[in-house]
Amino acid sequence: MQKVSCPNCGAEVTFRSPALPSRICDYCHTILVRSGGGIEQVGKAAVLPFDVSPIQIGTAGTFDGRDFTVVGRVRWGWTDGSWNEWLVLFGDGSDGWLGEAMGQFMLTKERPLGDVQSDPTIRAIILGERVPIGTEAQVDGETFIVSDAREATCLAAEGELPFTAITGTTIYSIDFRSTTGALASLQREKTLSSFYQGRYVTLAELRPRHLRAIDGWPMPAYGT
């Protein structure tokens, strides 16, 4: 854990993991990046739009027997709506993403592209092609089907992140589903791609604590 002063406003900023180089100041929303032992300012994050998510920075839970804490968020938007990607930091220092869209939750972890790019569909996307809904891909011998493909724009971000989330950045986002309930996502920004794999989860399964109180929503017993 590293604590520094924000070079813009002087507020204390905490970096909890050496694997997460980007941090957004909680007070002035300046985007900070660790570089060469120092802190660099690379712009400002937009103010997050209002939503009714029960998740917030500091929410803690358990996934497959491993404790995690929510440390960051990116809000993505597209022509018909938006969704949250919450960054979770596990006790062993690894991280994952808790996606939240239309009341559903999914938890994924990044996989090296070398593990999956031998599949023709995934390789085509990485090389810049677009694929129609229903196209199949093979990952570890399991069939995944393209269920959604869209352009998405970074609306805002907060907390700690593994990359610099600049407001207005646009990506091509492709979602895959399998018949077993597994899911995957491939995100491409210009010539850079990232692949994530995981599954759907429920709040009850994660048993999250420190949830955000929402008017009209009964807080579950585990949520406080």
Image: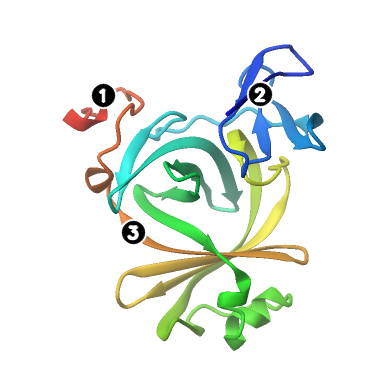
Real-space CA distance between mark 3 and mark 2, rounded to the nearest whole angstrom: 31 Å
Q: Residues within 10 Å of mark 1 (few under 14, many from 20)?
A: few
**x and y, in percent, of residue 87 in the image:** 50, 43
Q: Residue 25 carries which label?
A: 2
* Horizontal side of residue 222 vs 117, given as left or right: left
What residue would you read off at disc 1? Answer: 224
Q: Residue visible at 45% across and 36% down? A: 70
Quadrant containing the N terminus in the rendered view: top right
Q: Is residue 90 above or below residue 152?
A: above
What residue would you read off at disc 3? Answer: 200
- The one nearer the camera, 36 or 109, is 36
* Horizontal side of residue 115 vs 58, given as left or right: right
Does the residue at mark 1 contact the one at mark 3 (Cβ under 8 Å)? no
Q: Is residue 78 above or below residue 133?
A: above
Q: Residues within 10 Å of mark 3 (few under 14, many from 20)?
A: some
Real-space CA distance between mark 1 and mark 3, rounded to the nearest whole angstrom: 23 Å
Real-space CA distance between mark 2 and mark 1, rounded to the nearest whole angstrom: 25 Å
Label 2: element kind: loop
Label located before the other in sequence (2 or 1)? 2
Does the residue at mark 3 contact the one at mark 2 (Cβ under 8 Å)? no
Q: In this view, does 124 lie above or below 41?
A: below
Q: Residue visible at 56% across and 76% down? A: 115
**x and y, in percent, of residue 217 in the image:** 25, 29
Q: Residue visible at 36% across and 69% down? A: 182
Quadrant containing the C terminus in the rendered view: top left
Q: Is residue 98 above or below residue 223?
A: below
At label 2, which amino acid type do we have?
Cys
